[in-house]
Amino acid sequence: MSMKKNIDRREFLKRLGIGAGVAGLALSGCKGASDTIDKRTKGGEGEIPTDSMTYRKNPRTGEDVSILGYGCMRWPMTTNESGEEVIDQEMVNRLVDTALAHGVNYFDTSPAYCRGLSERATGIALARHPRNSYFIATKLSNFAPQTWSREASVEMYRNSFKELQTDHIDYLLLHAIGVGNGMADFEARYIDNGLLDFLVAEREAGRIHNLGFSYHGDIDVFDRALAEHDKYKWDFVQIQLNYLDWGHAHVLNPGNTDSEYLYRELEKRGIPAVIMEPLLGGRLANVPDHIAGRLKQREPEKSVASWAFRYAGSMPGVLTVLSGMTYMEHLEDNLRTYCPLVPLTEEETEFLHETAGLMAQYPTISCNYCNYCMPCPYGIDIPAILTHYNKCVNHGYVAEGSQSENYAEARRAFLIGYDRSVPKLRQASHCTGCGQCSPHCPQSIDIPGELQRIDRYVEGLKRNA
């Protein structure tokens, strides 16, 4: 491919307004995937059937969509000959081939994922297969003000077709409505510039088969979009749903919306739900030890993660459940859960709700490792810091005080793990409180406040040697 045709990636991101220093979402990396399967809580092994995938029917088109959808936000990474971190295309191809062979047919990406390279990698992998064997979902990820003009947004939309090597998008989403400045940003991104009307016309022309949106943040924006369902006729909506957010979203984070409200509002209108964050960025796979024991006691041969996937998939209004499967073990574990799906019984659902109540007592930070907050202008590795803190909470390594019974063990584990997980120059002590990260967080975390709290905790551990 010539340099003229294949424009420089940095220039591409700059032209679309999603370069470094503008919108951290654009640089969401694939490294450090959070949907990991804790070795303590891994599921069974053995051959996975290729003809047992559970499907849900799109009520408008009649299409059969696999209940397991492939989230392409966390493709595996490798290093090229120049020492640059790039997507491991060979591994992506293997993952896609395995997924398709086992019946997965829904692939969800965005111009913003994997440092702007996810669509291209996904397109390369899928183009090796018949176009009618899969559905492509991608997004209009025009977060930065530079992309709010009709021209810039349309350019982003049309570039998705090139990157994905397709003449139509099966499922097109307005990306993360409600984030940033809520209603003001929603209107600037999609209404004032006439872009939503343009996308509706594209659907009528057949270049978009299903039009919907994904939601995070300001509930008024979600309600506004649904109030206009008669006008826009949303074909699907992507929401965060899991057994912890179903009843405890506001307990865990006052900025989150309860999953039950989102799901019920879609259910009332007959709008299929696409589920994101079924594992809460991996937090429902890497749970506190006593929670893991509780789940494994019920299903010794199943992974802890499988409970979360069964929970999301058991709801009849769900079209597909997305998982960012970086490694083959992620994919294989989820295939075992959904080939076929065994829906939860009422008793099992209640068991999970009770489990969620126990988990809500743990003061973890609601970081889903999406990397939307990155890059930090001061080089801080925000997701790694928050993830390390959460892991220590789950394993009992955040001591309440120096008089705690396990203080010495917890202190050592926290400090050694912190230095191993996060280089010193990228630790919380370097946070200036500039606040650039917070507006991009889908979970509405007060990131500077949490970093400063963690830094105070670390300094206290160091003083109490």
Image: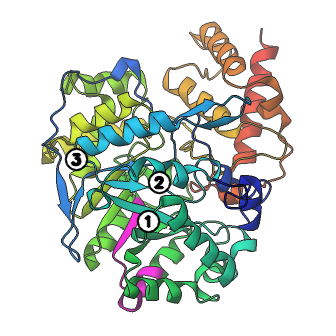
Is residue 237 highlighted in magenta? yes
- The residue stretch that appears in magenta: 225-239
Of labels 1 and 3, earlier in sequence is: 3
Q: Residue at x 59, y 86 (%)?
A: 191
Few, some or many residues within 10 Å of mark 3 (<14, 14–19, 20+) = many
Quadrant of the image occupied by residue 268: bottom left
Q: Earlier in the sequence, mark 1 or mark 2?
A: 2
On the image, which quarter does residue 421 sit in? top right
Q: Say if mark 1 contacts mark 2, CB within 8 Å.
A: yes
* Residue at the image position 59 percent from the left and 30 percent from the top: 78
Cβ atoms at labels 3 and 2 below 8 Å apart: no
Q: Residue furthest bottom?
A: 231
Which of marks 2 and 3 precedes in the sequence? 3
Vertical order, 318 against 334 (above or below): below
The disc label shown at residue 166, or none: 1
* Along the line of sight, the residue nearer the viewer: 128 or 400: 128
Residue 335 image position (x, y, % from top left)? 25, 38
Which label belongs to residue 123?
2
* Magenta highlight on residue 186: no
Residue found 28% across the figure and 45% down from its top: 100
SS state under label 3: loop
The label shown at residue 103 is 3
Q: Residue 281's spot in the image, x, y percent?
A: 48, 42
Give above or below for 13 relative to 177: above
Mark nearest the camera among 3 and 2 is: 2
**Label 1 secondary element:** loop
Mark whose residue sits in front, 1 or 3: 1
CA separation in Å, label 1 and label 3: 21 Å
**C-alpha separation, residue under disc 3 versus residue under disc 2:** 18 Å
